[in-house]
Amino acid sequence: MNPSLLVTMALFGSAFAGSKVVVEQLPHQVAAVLRFGGAALILLTVVFARRRGARLTRAQIIRCGLVGLLGVFAYNVFFFWALSLAPSIDGSVIVPVMSPILVVLARPERTTPFRIAGLLFGLTGAVVFFTGARLGGPRLLGDLLFLLGAGAWAAYSITSKRVLAGVDPLRATTIATGVGAIALLIPAVPALPAAHWGAVSGTAWAALAYLAAGPTALAYLLYYRGLAKVSPSTATIMMFTVPLFGVTCSALLLHESFTATQLAGAALMLPGAILAVAGARPSESPRRWRLARR
């Protein structure tokens, strides 16, 4: 198990509870732009300090920006909106589990029994999970927004692999994060009058600083470092540790919990997603992957 990737998944998982703390005291649109604006500044600082890596062409910069509109702007519009309606514990399961399932559904790969079984388990679990979110309530709407966020992240995952091939990961991430943060200003500006800055607690500001530095800037840097040492399949499978970290943080820090029906749905979704991803990907050798990246 790669240490960099394991720390990355822990950071990703903690972002759900941390973001919930912030949206409880600031409009969700404002919380999103502050998190990713801060992360963009941190990444820019790292890029200038590093002073390495090939310069990007204008076409590459445009592609990175378009990817940022999908993976940063679109995803986080749904993510932070969902957090204002539903517990973070729901998102910590829906997003990291449903995203790989949606990726598998979107990719024209050879059908295998494992893949079929995994998709059936995962989709059945999703139906059960949403049924347990109290039909018609704000929690159900929030969970559906988490699902839309998972769809945006799945589309980002597919697109970025094609569009950003051969581009320096740090520079690509910095541009994508910066463009996404600027785009997040569009929904944030009308929400600014509703922000009561004097009432924001020190805890919320600390959570915001942590979100920008940890689960956003640092997590992406560690993620790319980990990818250099393992195969893409291994990295994808490790994504399924995110719910463990996310649920733990939400339960311990925010005292959130699932309904019994949601717990049953999650118990179907997680193994279903693992089966779907494992059955859809050909076996890859980590050594061959490392050689290919050199």
Image (cartoon, grey):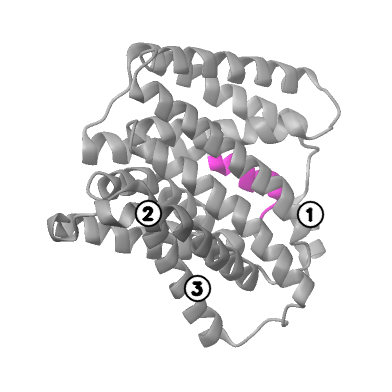
Residue 161 appears in view:
yes
Query: Gap in Å between the C-alphas at discs 1 and 3?
Result: 23 Å
Query: Gap in Å between the C-alphas at discs 1 and 2?
Result: 35 Å
Nearer the viewer's eye, disc 3 or disc 2? 2
Q: Position of residue 290 (x, y in %)?
A: 75, 61
**Residue at disc 3, secondary structure:** helix
Question: What residue would you read off at disc 1?
Answer: 162
Q: How many marks?
A: 3
Question: What residue would you read off at disc 2?
Answer: 190
Q: Amino acid at mark 3?
A: Leu
Question: What residue would you read off at disc 3?
Answer: 43
**Residue at disc 1, secondary structure:** helix
Q: Amino acid at mark 1?
A: Arg
**Residue at disc 2, secondary structure:** helix
2 to 172, vertically: above or below: above
178 and 4: which is toward the camera: 178
